[in-house]
Image: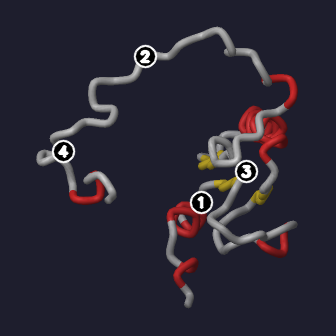
Amino acid sequence: MGLGRSTVATWLDAAGYDTAFFGKFLNGNETGREGAPPGWDRWVPSYYPWQDPALGTAAARWIDNRGDRPFFAALWLRNPHVPYEPHPRFVGTHQDETFPLPPSYDEEDVSDKPPSCAPRP
């Protein structure tokens, strides 16, 4: 449909930025450089949750090796998505911890929120 021809990546690329994408891109399964949408100079797609740590490392290396040119890096990780499949080195690392929920969690009165926040039937 041509929607990918005018995005933050194409705008920044046209303005002289180096652009890089690491991670899960929408719901397609683009693999390799040939699948890169317009505007991305570096393209590292992944759809496997166990690759999230490697993607973070790849993005950090790319950023660390930047010159003086401005850049834009997007790191979109697969997790958290169901089914939750943590990297083996992270399994059980927070097993005994509890995490407090914010007051807005499961809020009954959402009349002050956009319609998309309303509870689903």
Q: Residue at x 83, y 43 (%)?
A: 51
Q: CA distance from mark 4 to mark 1?
A: 43 Å
Q: Earlier in the sequence, mark 4 or mark 3?
A: 3
Is the Cβ of the residue at disc 2 closer than 8 Å to that at disc 3? no
Side of 117 relative to 21 (left or right): left
Q: Amino acid at mark 3?
A: Phe
Q: Residues within 10 Å of mark 2 (few under 14, many from 20)?
A: few
Q: Which quadrant of the figure contains the C terminus?
A: bottom left
Q: Earlier in the sequence, mark 4 or mark 1?
A: 1
Residue 39 percent location from the top left of the image: 64, 68
Residue under circle 4? 110
Q: Depth-wise, is mark 4 or mark 3 nearer the camera? A: 4
Residue 120 percent location from the top left of the image: 33, 57
Q: CA distance from mark 1 to mark 3?
A: 20 Å
Residue under circle 1? 16
Residue under circle 2? 100
Q: Earlier in the sequence, mark 1 or mark 3?
A: 1
Residue under circle 3? 22
Answer whether residue 66 is visible to the viewer in this image: no
Q: Depth-wise, is mark 2 or mark 3 nearer the camera? A: 2
Q: Residue at x 72, y 37 (%)?
A: 63
SS of the residue under disc 1 = loop
